[in-house]
Amino acid sequence: MYGLKSTIVMPKYTPWIKISNTKKYGAEVILEGQSYYEAEKYATELAKELKAKMIHAYDDPFVIAGQGTIGWEIIEDLKDIDYVIVPVGGGGLISGIASVIKTIKPSTRVIGVQSEVTPSAYLSLKQGRIITVDNTDTIADGIAVKKIGDLTFDIMQNTLDDVVLVSDQEIVNAILILAESAKVIAEGAGAVAVAALLSGKINVKGNVVAIVSGGNIDVTILAKVLYKGLVQTGRLIMLKGLIPDRPGMLAQVTGVLGRLGVNIVEIRHERYNPLIRPNYTEVDIIVEAPPEEGAVDRVIEELSKLGFNFKVEAP
């Protein structure tokens, strides 16, 4: 808008969609380092070299103030708020939101949520000093920050009621629920607040606001996440069994599934395992689990009547 040149430094393994969207705004994108921490160090040196203004991703009063406008929107839209649940990485987002909420409605509880893989804010607030963590290998890459900011640490200490941790599996489930029920596509970092609620990590009552703060997720990653979510919630199951390795046997099995209204997603064969008899093949059939109670048991029973011994496993 102002004709200024911007250079954005991101870690090397930043999802493609974030890189692409940033470039669409006209920025030059440089990929450097394995984590945000390393990218930030490079950006600081680059800013000196270019004689450019360094704008920190979260430890900056104006960035925090800008993110605080989300708090204003919440207060404008809702009269009575008991809880506001916010994703936490370096702490900029929650520092801004909490500053506004606690000033206008101090009785409202503000709770942060962080990935258990990278609990930098959680540990820092529990121990009363800034803690640096090493692991950033989480699906919530947008909040995978090794070290929170000095400014955000001070603000969080004075405004937050609690910080909780969620696992990657809980985040996956939240992404699935958001996509299916709310028709909202969220990235891992954006879904952690919902993950904390769904997993019971936060005991809440009354009016609750969960911040869904980002939707930059690659379609390929989204497909994998949704698949894992379906498996995790028992919506996809695998029928595993041995059948004679001769024509027509698999057709009998799939015929039973078709008759019972079971949709087949994938079929895999294993003929080369030395533990399997030479005239048999092991078949893995991934199916959508029927919604009716006891439907899977009926499938196993009907297959058993034909002499096929199948069991249910996770894909």
Image (cartoon, rainbow, N blue to C red):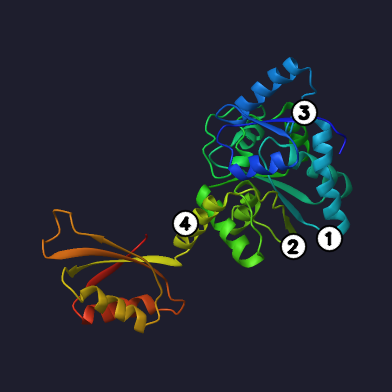
Category of crowding for the residue at label 1, using alpha-carbon neighbours closer than 10 angstroms: few (below 14), some (14–19), many (at least 20): few
Query: Badge 4: few (under 14), some or many (20 or more) residues near its Cα, within 10 Å?
Result: some
Which mark identifies residue 71? none
Instruction: Give the CA separation, mark 3 to mark 1.
Output: 35 Å
Q: Are marks 2 and 1 in contact (CB under 8 Å)?
A: yes
Q: Is residue 171 above or below residue 177?
A: above
Q: Is residue 137 above or below residue 182?
A: above
Image coords of residue 53 (percent x, y): 80, 23
Residue 118 appears in the figure: yes
Q: Quadrant of the C terminus?
A: bottom left
Is the residue 102 above or below the residue 77 in the image? above
Which of labels 4 and 2 is toward the front? 4
- Residue at position x 28%, y 81% from top? 302
Image-based side of 313 in relation to 169, left or right: left
> What is the distance, in whole Å, between disc 2 and disc 3 at their CAs?
38 Å
Pointer 3 with pointer 4, Cβ within 8 A: no
**Are the residues tagged 2 and 3 within 8 Å (C-beta)?**
no
Residue corresponding to mark 3: 55
Instruction: Identify residue type, mark 1.
Output: Asp
**Residue that mark 2 sits on:** 206
SS category of the residue bearing label 3: loop
Between the residue at mark 2 and the residue at mark 1, the CA separation in whole angstroms equals 9 Å
**Which residue, given by chain and number where applicable, does mark 4 sit on?**
228
- Residue farthest to the left, as pictured: 278
Residue kind at label 2, given as amino acid type: Gly
Q: Which mark is residue 80?
A: 1
Mark 4, secondary structure of its residue? helix
Q: Nearer the viewer, mark 3 or mark 1?
A: 3
Q: Is residue 127 left or right of residue 236?
A: right
Disc 2 packing (10 Å; few <14; some 14–19; many ≥20): few
